[in-house]
């Protein structure tokens, strides 16, 4: 998603208590970086943050890490998170927002940073053959996630793109994951306990596109 530069984003992020600008400093220490130790879930490519804001604020017994690499996106995420928690009258103490290139995720995540679940929502489909290794569900990337995703840990994946979805089945198999549930029409057949719509999901649904989704488990 392209987004215009927002001059307020960087100053607001630097002043934000739940934003981490240099996540490498927390490598191996993520569980100690929250107010309370709980299991960790992670969203890769959090965009404007509506999804993670709703998810984290309604599951206070779980700690969340949300990652993106664009200041403007992270600035909007920060504001959406703040609003979700303000509506509840509480501080956002179970979420950390951070900036990094997900292709280099092992620069800030290690085996000690055990994650129970990863969310990947509407990532760039990279349709050209020469770019497919950039996909967040590509075998190469999934092998990186295995480093810190616990055995039996899950990846929840949503997309509108048929090519990306269908080719991801092979990626998951190659990386040692089992797809335990899938659907080509999430809104007609919800495979999640609760489905929180993202900005992209609402837009694509209004355009008449079917939302594809799957749950894969690390074996």
Image (cartoon, grey):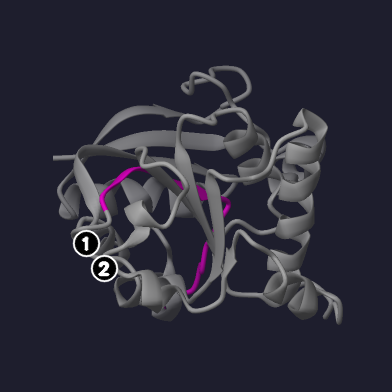
Front residue of 115 and 45: 115
- Dot 2 falls on a residue whose secondary structure is helix
Cβ–Cβ below 8 Å for labels 1 and 2?
A: yes
**Where residue 188 sits: x, y (%)?**
61, 18
Q: Residue at x 36, y 42 (%)?
A: 37
**Where residue 98 sits: x, y (%)?**
55, 67
Is residue 181 left or right of 187 when viewed as pictured? left
Which circle marks residue 46 in the picture?
none
The 10 Å Cα crowd at callout 2, few under 14, some 14 to 19, many 20 or more, is some
Q: Residue at x 54, y 31 (%)?
A: 60
Residue 169 seen in this snapshot: yes
The 10 Å Cα crowd at callout 1, few under 14, some 14 to 19, many 20 or more, is some
Which circle marks residue 143 in the picture?
1
**Where residue 45 sits: x, y (%)?**
55, 60
Residue 68 image-quadrant placement:
bottom right
Relative to 147, does residue 37 appear above or below in the rendering? above
Q: Residue at x 76, y 29 (%)?
A: 88
Magenta region: which residues?
114-129
Relative to 65, does residue 186 appear above or below in the rendering? above
Which circle marks residue 140 in the picture?
2
- Dot 1 falls on a residue whose secondary structure is helix
Relative to 62, does residue 92 appear above or below in the rendering? below
Is residue 153 left or right of 93 when viewed as pictured? left
Is residue 68 left or right of 180 when viewed as pictured? right
Is residue 94 left or right of 215 when viewed as pictured? right
121 is within the stretch colored magenta:
yes
Quadrant location of the C terminus in the rendered image: top left
Quadrant location of the N terminus in the rendered image: bottom right
32 is within the stretch colored magenta:
no
Query: How far apart are labels 1 and 2 at the CA level?
Result: 5 Å
């Amino acid at each position: 998603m392209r987004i215009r530069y927002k001059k307020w984003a960087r100053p607001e992020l630097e002043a934000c208590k739940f934003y981490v600008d240099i996540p490498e400093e927390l490598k191996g220490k993520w569980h100690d970086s929250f107010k309370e130790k709980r299991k960790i879930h992670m969203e890769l490519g959090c965009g404007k943050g509506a999804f993670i804001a709703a998810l984290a604020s309604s599951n206070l017994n779980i700690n969340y890490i949300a990652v993106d690499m664009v200041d403007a996106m992270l600035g909007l995420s920060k504001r959406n998170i703040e609003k979700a928690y303000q509506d509840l009258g509480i501080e956002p103490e179970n979420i950390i927002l951070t900036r990094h290139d997900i292709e280099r995720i092992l620069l800030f995540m290690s085996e000690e940073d055990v994650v129970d679940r990863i969310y990947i929502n509407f990532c760039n489909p990279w349709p050209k053959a020469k770019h497919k290794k950039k996909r967040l569900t590509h075998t190469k990337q999934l092998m990186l996630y295995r480093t810190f995703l616990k055995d039996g840990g899950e990846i929840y994946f949503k997309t509108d793109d048929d090519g990306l979805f269908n080719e991801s089945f092979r990626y998951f198999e190659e990386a040692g994951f089992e797809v335990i549930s899938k659907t080509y029409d999430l809104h007609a057949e919800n495979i999640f306990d609760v489905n929180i719509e993202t900005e992209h999901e609402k837009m694509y649904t209004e355009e008449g596109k079917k939302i594809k989704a799957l749950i894969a488990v690390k074996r």
